[in-house]
Image: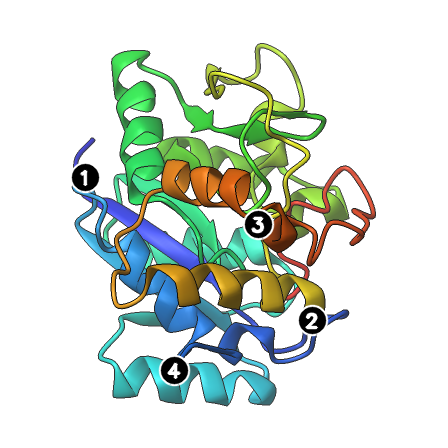
Amino acid sequence: MGRTIAIVQARMRSTRLPGKVLADIRGEPMLARVVERVRMARLLNEVVIGTTTDAADDAVVELSETRSYPIYRGHPTDVLDRYYQAAGAYGADTVVRITADCPLIDPTLIDQTLGELVSQQADFAANRLPRQRTYPIGLDVEVCTFDALARAWRGASEPFEREHVMPYLYQVPGRFKTVLLNADSNLGNLRWTVDTQADLEFVKAVYQHFLPRIDFKWTEVLQLLTQRPELAAINAGVPHRTEFDVEERSS
């Protein structure tokens, strides 16, 4: 794998919940909650915040500098370019894409996805694709080699390919070797991401149950929701807008 870098994309200008990446989750900004959990992955060398040159994102930079998080500022809407430039700046051989609206992200899934990339000698691996997901929304992990990312950076021309970073790697069968990880059962209807106030309240309730632990696993969250279905009901009515709704609208 060489040097493996997770890049957490974070931007303040979310359309449905502005400023959500710094929203408080039981005493910590959401971005910090994400970074804390991503850093628990055993196969990562570094976790980098990928934000933009937009003045609104000065707040993301301030938090990152206060917490000593490595950071890269790049293009506001060409997120593929932002990832490519950040990966190059931090000497990545393998790149992990994480979004800052997923505070329940599981480090074990990050390691498993990286493991599949290596064992299958693939260019790209993920635990979800558009219309193909068995893990809850909010546990999304995408990984690729830097060489594959560079090819995407050079070849991707459609706006959605630039905005959503990695579609160029999996949209055309045979263009790259790809691997899709599936859960033991189909849980793709569960919503564990943060895009609305209801989503935020759901995540706060989950953290409230587990704190002071922050190393709880996604399977423990699933067990909690089985025991307390009223928690899942908090954001059950939030709709998903498009096949790319799993992507982070705040880029």
In this view, the mark in front (2 or 1): 2
Picture layout, residue 231 above or below residue 224: below
- Distance, label 4 to label 1, CA atoms, is 28 Å
Q: What element carries label 1?
A: loop
Q: What element carries label 4?
A: loop
Residue position for label 4 = 27
Q: Where residue 27 appears, x then y in whole percent?
A: 38, 82
- Distance, label 3 to label 4, CA atoms, is 19 Å
Tag count in the figure? 4
User: Which mark sits nearer the N-terminus, 2 or 3?
Assistant: 3
Figure quadrant of the N terminus:
top left
Three-letter residue code for mark 4: Gly
User: Which mark sits nearer the N-terminus, 2 or 4?
Assistant: 4
Q: Which residue is drawn at 53% across and 44% down?
A: 225
Residue position for label 3 = 192
Q: Residues within 10 Å of mark 2 (few under 14, many from 20)?
A: some
Q: Which residue is drawn at 73% across and 49% down?
A: 236
Q: Is mark 3 on a helix, strand or loop?
A: loop
Figure quadrant of the C terminus:
bottom right
Q: Where residue 79 appears, x then y in whole percent?
A: 57, 57
Three-letter residue code for mark 2: Gln
Residue position for label 2 = 197
Per the rendering, the mark at residue 43 is 1
